[in-house]
Structure formats: structure tokens, C-alpha cells
Amino acid sequence: MAKLRVGAIGVGGMGKAHLDSILVHKGVTVRAVCDVSTAALDAVQTPGVHKYTDWRELIAKEELDLVAVCLPHHLYPPVVIAALKAGLHVYKDKPFAKDLADARKMLAAAKKHQRRLFVGAQRKFSPSFLKALDILKSGKLGKIHFVRGAIHYYWTPVFEDAMRWRGQAKESGGIAIIDSGYHILDAVMAFCGTPRSVFASTGSLRAAAKGTYDIDDKAALVLDFPDGALGSMTISFATVPGEFRVVLHGQAGTLDITPAAMNLYQADKLVETITVDDAKVNTLAAQFAHCVKALRAGKPSLCDPDRALEVQKVIEAAYRSDAAGEVVRVR
């Protein structure tokens, strides 16, 4: 089977992590990379890779099957749509877009040009998530009636007023809910489906004396699901200790999920502790391999854009709820 020919647009920061995870895949060959930063391009040492500073040139000149795109949120639509129009499949980082309108434009382009569009959220490929999904499907928890989620970080740029584009709502769309919050929402929705409504409240620390950012660095959400289940989530970029946790409360059992271990309860009794070690798994590489396999087989993936659009709908509803101070329907 011929190797998949790949180009990468945006190879600095998180884009470099994505590129490294693509390079280890034996079924693909990276033909070209693009970035406006010469330092980011210089850091790519793979022999034979063509380098560009204009993504339009890369798309026009290279013979590719797929492009991996990792950019500031507001820059996604023109790049993704142009690649799809050129007949290329697209693999992009989360979030889907800075807002729901942009997400819908990219999804429409994928359908119009009949190309695959993958929206990554790599925590779905962690051992803890996959094991939790197996336990949920086994019926050990029964019907889920309540779900709790938390993702907390201490991110130094928040305190140094150095978030650059991420700190500007017109470019990022936000940060707590739409960025790291995407991971926890994506996980919760994989377990429980799309909520019908959301109530959200956000806050901004603005620790710098002359702070310039205008986005949320913390948020709290309450989710109401169609089957009667409830959910709560807290997200922060400005707190310690760090935490990533999802707790599924079912009528037959409870599962407390963290990246290191999962505790299974029946009633109020701990019946099993399952050791996992998410840190040992390259989830970006696992995610890319999953998408390549789905592309070659013509089968659905965990990164399909219809799934990502549902997450984007909840994010949009959460920000509307915060602005209005009321419960907002997800639509």
C-alpha cells in the first residue's frame, strides 16, 4: 500500500507536537511543512521535507493526500476550506473553530468536496478514556444520572499577560471553555451525549497590572441532558493543583476517572481500582494513526466533524449563557 503523502501547516508550538506524532507513523511520508516563523521551520530537521512560509504555495505546489493543520483558531477556515477544495483530506487540532459559524463553514466544505475532515481531541485516545468507555458499555454503571468533570491548570502566561492571540476573544474565541475545556466536554459528551441546555459562568483573573487579555481563564458549567441526567464542569487555567477528572455516577455504580487510576464503586463501596498511566501513551500519535486507519478503510472515526460540531454547539451555548446570565438551549 502506498504511503499517505502529508503536508503540515503550522509547525510551531502544538503544531510541532503534532508533526512529531505524524513522523513516527510508518504509513505516511511528510512531504512539506509551512509556518510563518522561520525558527519553527528551522526546527524541522527531517531530510527531504520542503519548507514554505505561505500555505497557499504548499497546497498549490505539493502533491499531497492530506494536510495537518494547527493554527490560531481564527485562521482555520480559509486554510481548511482551500485544502478541501484542492481535493485534500484535512486533519486539524481542536477546537473545531473559534465559533460555530466557522465550524459549519468547514463542515459544509468537507461535504461539498467529498473529503475527510478530522478534528483531533487526543484525550479520547488515552488508556483511561478507552477503559472507561469499555466499562460504561459493559453495563456495570447502569444508566448515568450525574457526571462531573474538571480540568485545571496553572498556566504561567495568564499571570504574565503573555497569552498573545489566545488572550484575544476575536482570535481565539475564548480559552477556558473552548480550549482546554474542549477536552473535558469532548470526554463527557462521548459518555453521555449532547446536553439539551447549559448554564455557564466565566471569570478572568487579569493578574497583570496592565492586563490586555479579554477572555475567560476559568469557567463553571451545568449541563442538562435529554435523558434527565445532569452534569457539572469546572475549568481553570489559573489554579493549582492540576487536575483532569471525570466522574460517572450511574444507577448501578460510579466510576472515578483520572489519568493515573480509575476507581469503581458499587453503592458507597470501592470494589475495584484500575491502574492506568496515560502519561506513557503518545495520544497524539494514537489519534493520528486512528484517523489514517479510518481514512484508508472509509469508516467513521472518533474525530469526525459531526461529533466535533456537537461539542462546538455546547461551547457556543455556554458562552451565550455566560453573556446572558441564563440557561441556554443547545442548538
Image (cartoon, helix red, strand yellow):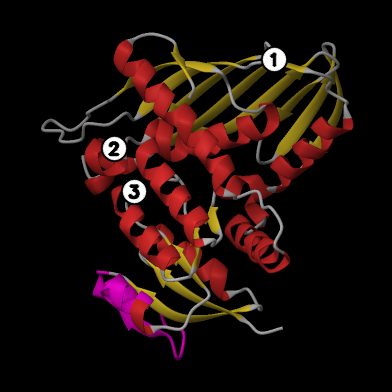
Task: Write down the residue under mark 3.
Answer: 73
Residue 114 image position (x, y, % from top left): 54, 61
SS of the residue at dot 1? Answer: loop
Magenta span includes 43: yes
Q: Nearer the viewer, residue 3 or 19?
A: 3
Relative vertical location of residue 308 with respect to residue 289 in this rendering, above or below: above
Farthest bottom residue in view: 48
Magenta span includes 212: no
Residue numbers of the magenta segment: 36-59
Residues at marks 1 and 3, CA–CA distance in whole angstroms: 33 Å
Task: Write down the residue under mark 1.
Answer: 227
Relative vertical location of residue 269 with respect to residue 118 in this rendering, above or below: above
User: Going 49% across and 79% down the picture, which residue do you hit?
Assistant: 64
Drawn side of residue 114 relative to residue 102, left or right: right
Task: Write down the residue under mark 2.
Answer: 158
Relative vertical location of residue 148 with respect to residue 106 in this rendering, above or below: above
